[in-house]
Image (cartoon, rainbow, N blue to C red):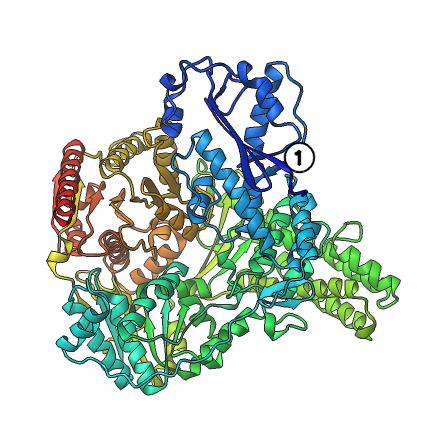
Amino acid sequence: MVESQKYAIVDIETTGHSQANGDRMIQIAIVIMEDWCIKKTFTSFIHPGKSIPLFIQDLTNITDTDVQDALPFEAHADYIYELLQDAVFVAHNTDFDLSFLQGEFKRVGLPNWSGKKIDTVELSKILFPSSISYKLGDLAADLNIPLNNAHRADDDALACALLLKECWKELLALPQVTLEQMHKKSFRLKSNISQLFFEALQIKRNKVAKEDDYVYYNKLALKKPMKIEKVVQDTLVYPHTTSEKVGLFKQALPHFEVRQGQFEMMDIIWENLKSKSEIMIEASTGIGKTIGYLMPSILYAIQSNRKVCISTYTTNLLEQLLTNEVPKVEKIMGRPINVTLLKGKKNYVDVILFEQLMKSQELSYDETLTVLQVLVWLSKTETGDLSELNCSGGGQLFVDKIRKNGESIQQKQAFDYYDRAIKESVEADLIITNHSMLLADLVRHEPIFDEIGGWIIDEAHQFVQAAEQHDQAIFTFTNWKYIFGRIGLSTDQELFSSFQKIAVKKQRVPLKIFHQLEKIFIRLVELFDKTMQDIVVQMKVFSKNPKSNLKRIEFIHELSLNREYILDFSKAMQHWIDLAEQVSTLFKRDIEQIAPEHKLVLEQWDYWIREYKMKASEWDEIFLKTDEEYTTWIEIDRRNIPGSIRVLKKPISISSTIEQLFHPIRQKSAVIWTSGTLAVPNNERFIAKQLGINKDVPLKILQAPKQYYKGAKAYIVNDMPEIQAVSQSDYIESVALSITQIVRSTEGRCFVLFTSLDMLRKTVELIQESELLDDYMIFAQGVTNGSRMRLLKSFQKFSHSVLFGTNSFWEGVDVPGDGLSSVVVVRLPFSAPDEPSFKAKSTVLQQQGKNAFSELSLPEAILRFKQGFGRLIRSSEDKGVFVVLDRRIETKSYGVEFLRAIPQISFTKLPLQDMVLEIEHWYNSKDEERKQVDNHDI
């Protein structure tokens, strides 16, 4: 870029997205930038020649009154066209703004505008790879760019111009080698970003600058790791008395509220750590559970010179511990804490594998974009944790390929982020990890865990689900077809063809061996396809609900699958692996003479051999191994046959797995299980039984005082229809109406819990069609793109937002602080009775002469119900509404068990409209109280 390059940053507002259907422009703004300074601006309302739709008025705050005296586009067209001449066209989503503008030029008789374009969405994804969202408003907030009126063209265009300038600064801050790699890969992008990269690179090359903050692997720049030095701690005394605790806390936290339950929890954990004993503690919301276990854990670790490990369930909770709770404890103690985060290997990037895959010339657009994101991210990340990246769906597939998995060839410790995390753990007093990492230690023992003096298992009820996920096996048709495709045949442009050409040409491997390998591979794919076809035929025979798109066979042994195909496939798979390893061994002779580009192909070959070994084990585990402790079932969607075939194998009980993990731990360390939900009325040890915890291990229940919940209101809507009494569409209509009115009365920040993903989708679709919540951000599991944590973080960023989820989404989700105004329970969260894993557990209980409903179904649902309420009130100052739409809570005898599970609050039964009026009145009165307090403070 010559410094005088002219940029025209454009934003338009329109009546809709379809010019073919008569949509027209209502506002345009253009910011002219040269030398990275704003030289000129143009903005004008445009008369669209039609009424502006109401939802567009709500979105843009542009009304028919605003444009009534404006001129049509024809009056401005020549001037706009002239402004764009010799400029690079810039917009936040050029596909919309430029194409719409081109359509308008064509309509009024002007020629097509031609020139380069830069899309700041595409550019921002590359340069800010860890941003939660790439919407202009979100990026502006993250980068402190002023944007007072989003979706107004003048404000948006100015914000986009400043965003472009921030992107330029970010480019210049990158190391030169990173820019060089980015420029090479940038020609596959959709907009002309390569020119921007080139000009930044020219500036970097002309400036002799030290880049001491990086270490280098080949042509990758990685942020240099900070030197970890253990902070030497003075001996700290545990505060035994209440006055000592109060003094310690209030000195650091002036607004600290005394919570006797928290102090009691601290004492219990302190004594159990010292005595190396085991205990379970249910600490309700309001106890201050996290600080309650952090304080005694850290003090014990320092005094005993033995580490304490805290294991929790979700990534979000790990981040909360590190970024929110640990700093509070450091403030209380008046000194830094030696703490580190340790996750399982697959959470970390494999730098060498990335460097190999990056060299591929066959990258798709999504893969190219992701490579550029990773290049930038590697120059910034201190952890190498891939969850920091925000990638598209196609990009996420590429990310999965670069996860650390086993030991890479010639792996260097400087670039091994997992190894770095292990080394940091050696110097730590406190290790924070997740349940899956802890369970993985059953297979891959980490010596660091031998040094643990105490274990705190937070979100202990989720350890059941984590153990089930650890022991499960999942077969998917698409995944297997993908790994077949990565090898390919000699006629394809895939790995087999490439490797064969090199190996034969260099006379390292005889051609006849490749012919033999290909013959086995063809047979392998044939046997696979026959087995899949056999499954499809059998599923058609056994399908119990021909009208349902999803077909499920609860137990795989119900099918008469051709065992000969299955066994032959297993043998052929092993034969192929053995021969592929032989090819690799032959090729590696005199390895120092192999060219670097050929080593890359070899390493890719070895990588896929390892993958095929894992897939071979998966096949045998699912199709050949029978185990009464597991349930195996098949699912298929008739809309996508055979692509939707999934076979799932899950343990019926995980108590033996947990006993295997904790038996050696219990011999030498304390184990503290804690959660906000460990017990249910009439079945206090429900979770303890599932975890296989001995009945002699005590369970302590700590409940916050009733005053803590003074800001909570709970309602049962008693004029909702009974689901069995009306059609599904009528019931969903009632649900949608209730949710809409509740959301509007509480002004958003609403969690909505469903038990059925199908009902969730249909409800969301109906709400969106009604446009009654168009001024709210709607995030829905299975509808909105992104992981569970991505949806949650996006939800938290907006005050006017609604989050829809099912049981699986709900469990383990935590929204801290003032994150929620309301929680709506559409249906009591029972597991679906035909869900195979649940059905298998129920069958076992029935065989033991027990009632599966009271022993499993009811306590599971009550725990989820408690979790839902626990998300609402996070401090004594919070206020929120908990609404149950399911009439069974008042019409069924078991309904009282749900109400007893939340003892500190009473439920009010009201018709929907009366409840909405009461909520609105309550919220308004709360706002008035707050205003009076604020005025008094002034």
Image-based side of 318 in relation to 474, left or right:
left
Number of callouts: 1
Q: Residues within 10 Å of mark 1 (few under 14, many from 20)?
A: some
Image-based side of 435 in relation to 17, left or right:
left
Which residue sits at x=37%, y=63%? 323
What residue did someone put label 1 on? 116
Q: Which of the two residues, 310 or 909, is positioned nearer the viewer here?
A: 310
Image-based side of 67 in relation to 375, left or right:
left
Residue 350: in sight, yes or no?
no
Residue 855 point in image, percent of width and height = 25, 60
Which residue sits at x=26%, y=63%? 849
Residue 622 point in image, percent of width and height = 53, 61
Residue 357: in sight, yes or no?
yes
Secondary element at tag 1:
loop
Determine which quarter of the picture holds residue 844: bottom left
Q: Amino acid type of disc 1?
A: Lys
Q: Which of the two residues, 276 or 291, is positioned nearer the viewer here?
A: 291
Image-based side of 650 in relation to 854, left or right:
right
Q: Is residue 64 above or below residue 251?
A: above
Determine which quarter of the picture holds residue 827: top left
Q: Which of the two residues, 460 or 230, is positioned nearer the viewer here?
A: 230
Q: Is residue 686 above or below residue 247?
A: above
* Quadrant the N terminus occupies: top right
Which residue sits at x=63%, y=14%? 109
Which residue sits at x=74%, y=63%? 600
Residue 434 point in image, percent of width and height = 41, 67
Residue 105 point in image, percent of width and height = 60, 19
